[in-house]
Image: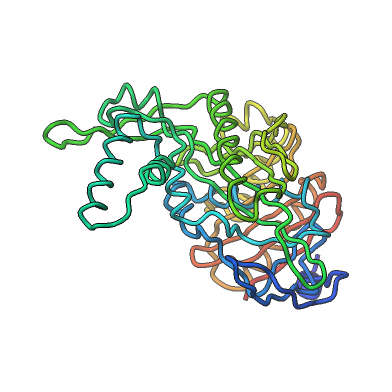
């Protein structure tokens, strides 16, 4: 393929990257924290599979909490994007508008992620709070104080410095992601559905202190079946709390349980189960299993369980080495649904000494992709230098043509 061919494909990509949707842009009024606010519904979206989003864009009420709760950046991206992907089964992008969660504040989420208090701990905390209020000559409502203190969903422990007790009762739930789905009627936008993602640990890390305040760090693996059992109970508890919130008494709720990967993993974890609770319902019924997996290439898991893709990627990497013998290797990330490869992302880090090298190498990789990589899955090839992304090659599943973009 000639160089001009690559450039023409780039132009085509720029012209088609934002395709107008069928709905016209409109101004609507939405209820936000008991106030009426004017928002704009865009007349376009990136594709039929994507949700339209209100303008100006609203950050979530619990913005920033996820960064403090999930240690792995790839898990952060996957749980947010994956929750939106699974929400499409219940909230059609052609009908619903996406908004980041506005009901669960950062304070609420942090409170729910804490541990429940034992009866002894609760009573001690209540009496301490009552004493403070009385000294300040303020009104005392013990029942309200108890409810405020007993917000934690994770299991209680008597002594946080008892490693055995901590391992037996780990903090399973590490984060709660909320997403809102709105519909418009008569220029009014109302929440017509919400999705809740429960991020569950696969490894629990903690520390204990001795009398000299010396810390000892521990970790324990959490079996998937136990994580799933606890996650389902947590979802029921959260549903009960949501139903007591103003505006959510009758709103449909989708729950999805996400199992995190280890904090050092180069690939994210995955969703393992989801369920839908219709409007007005207060009990969760059946759960639907989700069979998804993210796989690193090359890796022992890939060579053992995904032999065909491993061999193809290995051949692809070897052919790249024939062109650039001193490069460090292709790194692949495969996303599987029901054991079928759905998306493959290949990263190729190489040092270049001019734009001509970038163009020539991109053309070479383009040919390899056409020859070796199937069109049964979404494909993305990122060609990078140490300072920036140099070029991108991608193809949608089922398409024959590859799209190319050279970054300037």
Can residue 358 be seen by looking at this rendering? yes
Q: Note whether 211 is above or below 112 in the view shown.
A: above
Could you tell me residue 36's position as x and y percent?
64, 73
Q: Residue at x 86, y 54 (%)?
A: 400
Residue 330 can be seen, yes or no: no
Q: Position of residue 338 (x, y in %)?
A: 75, 33
Q: Residue at x 41, y 46 (%)?
A: 144
366 or 391, which is in the foreground? 391
Tell me: residue 93, above or below residue 29. above
Q: Is residue 392 shown left or right of residue 324?
A: right
Q: Is residue 197 left or right of residue 51?
A: left
Q: Quadrant of residue 217?
A: top left
Residue 401 sits above or below residue 372 on the image: below
Is 295 left or right of 175, judged from the image as shown? right
Quadrant including the N terminus = bottom right
Say which residue appears at 57% left-offset and 26% top-offset: 229
Up-down relation of residue 10 to residue 246 (above or below):
below
Residue 318 percent coordinates (x, y): 64, 44
Q: Which of the two residues, 344 or 356, is positioned nearer the viewer here?
A: 344
Q: Residue at x 66, y 62 (%)?
A: 99
Q: Position of residue 407 (x, y in %)?
A: 64, 72
């Amino acid at each position: 393929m000639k160089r001009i061919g690559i450039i023409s494909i780039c132009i085509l990509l720029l012209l088609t990257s934002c395709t107008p949707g069928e709905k016209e842009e409109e101004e609507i009024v939405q209820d936000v924290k008991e106030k009426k606010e004017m928002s704009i519904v865009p007349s376009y979206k990136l594709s039929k599979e994507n949700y339209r989003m209100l303008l100006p864009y609203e950050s979530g009420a619990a913005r920033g909490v996820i960064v403090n709760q999930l240690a792995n950046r790839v898990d952060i991206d996957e749980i947010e994007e994956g929750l939106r992907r699974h929400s499409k089964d219940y909230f059609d992008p052609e009908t619903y508008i996406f908004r980041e969660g506005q009901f669960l504040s950062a304070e609420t989420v942090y409170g729910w992620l804490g541990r429940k208090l034992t009866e002894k701990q609760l009573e001690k905390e209540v009496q301490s709070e009552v004493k403070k209020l009385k000294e300040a000559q303020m009104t005392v409502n013990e029942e309200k104080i108890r409810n405020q203190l007993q917000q934690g969903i994770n299991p209680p422990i008597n002594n946080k410095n008892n490693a055995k007790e901590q391992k037996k009762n780990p903090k399973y739930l590490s984060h709660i992601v909320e997403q809102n789905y709105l519909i418009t009627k008569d220029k009014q936008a109302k929440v017509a559905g919400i999705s809740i993602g429960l991020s569950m640990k696969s490894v629990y890390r903690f520390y204990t202190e001795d009398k000299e305040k010396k810390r000892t760090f521990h970790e324990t693996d959490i079996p998937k079946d136990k994580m799933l059992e606890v996650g389902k109970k947590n979802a029921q508890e959260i549903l009960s709390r949501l139903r007591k919130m103003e505006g959510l008494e009758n709103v449909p709720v989708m729950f999805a349980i996400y199992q995190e990967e280890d904090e050092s993993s180069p690939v994210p974890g995955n969703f393992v189960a989801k369920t839908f609770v219709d409007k007005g319902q207060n009990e969760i019924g059946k759960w639907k299993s989700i069979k998804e997996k993210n796989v690193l290439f090359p890796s022992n898991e890939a060579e053992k369980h995904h032999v065909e893709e491993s061999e193809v990627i290995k051949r692809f990497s070897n052919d790249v080495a024939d062109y650039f013998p001193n490069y460090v290797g292709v790194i692949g990330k495969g996303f599987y649904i029901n054991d079928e490869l759905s998306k493959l992302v290949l990263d190729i880090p190489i040092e270049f000494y001019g734009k001509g090298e970038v163009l020539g190498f991109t053309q070479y990789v383009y040919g390899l992709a056409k020859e070796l990589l199937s069109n049964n899955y979404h494909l993305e090839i990122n060609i990078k230098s140490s300072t920036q992304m140099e070029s991108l090659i991608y193809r949608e599943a089922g398409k024959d043509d590859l799209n190319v973009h050279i970054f300037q």
